[in-house]
Amino acid sequence: MINFSESTWLVGQAQPHGEASSDPAHAVVEHAAEAHASGGLPQLDVSTWPGQLFWLAVTFTLLYLMMWKVVLPRIRNAIEERRDRIADDLDAAADLKQKADDSSAEYERLLSDARAKAHALALGNRAEVDKAMAAEAAQADLEIAKRQDAAETRIADMRTKALANVETIAVDATRAIIVQLTGTELDDKSIQSAVSDGR
């Protein structure tokens, strides 16, 4: 394999020094040989630094102008649009929160009104129930009083009848005893007066 230095030597041997070559490939090889002979890259060649610095300044200036006039305004516009969109979203969120708070307050107010109405209705119903219960209790008391009077009347009648029966039984028993003891019969009026006196 032939390396770069050998190819350069071969080119140098093939053509005498001082003669210009009309072959472009030969010119490229010759230029590469000169660069290799100079000891490194052309960027490190001090003789090319002014041109490099000029093109560096031109390139930097063009890039700076492009960034300043094209790229940065777009970035700035994108940031402004994003900031505006975020601000709009925050405003919309604040509006929604305010509406939610208003709806919650309205719900609490309606719930409080409903509770107050239910309480008032319950109190009204309780008064009506108490009134109806009092009327029913009075009716029941009246019915019980009527039944008690009727029972007492029946008891008095039964007592009167019982006493009459007792008196009759006493008269009959007295008559039987007198007949057994004396063998004589008394009239009912005498026996009844004797029983009444003994009572």
Image: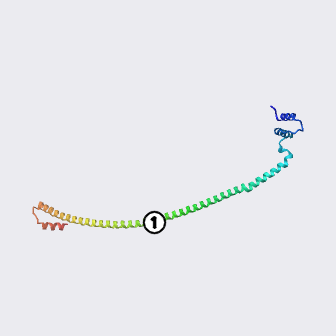
Residue furthest to the front in view is 22
Residue furthest top in the image: 1
Question: Taking 86 as reference, is 102 left or right?
Answer: left
Q: Which of the two residues, 18 or 117, is positioned nearer the viewer here?
A: 18
x, y percentage for residue 59? 78, 51
Residue 99 lies left or right of residue 198; in this view the side is right
Q: Residue at x 80, y 52 (%)?
A: 58
Determine crowd level at label 1: few under 14, some 14-19, many 20+ residues with C-alpha closer than 10 A: few
**Residue annotated with mark 1:** 117
Residue 164: image x %, image y %? Answer: 18, 65
Q: Is residue 15 above or below residue 177?
A: above
Element class at badge 1: helix
Q: Position of residue 49 (x, y in %)?
A: 84, 48
Q: How is the image coloured?
A: rainbow
Residues 86 and 33: in front is 33
- Farthest residue to the right: give it: 18
Q: Quadrant of residue 119?
A: bottom left
All told, the count of numbered labels is: 1
Q: Quadrant of residue 42?
A: top right
Residue 62 position (above or below residue 25) = below
Amino acid at dot 1: Lys
| Left/right of residue 163 with respect to residue 38 in the rendered view | left
Give how far across and how far down residue 39 sits, in percent. 85, 40
Q: Which quadrant is the N terminus positioned in? A: top right
Image quarter in which the C terminus is found: bottom left
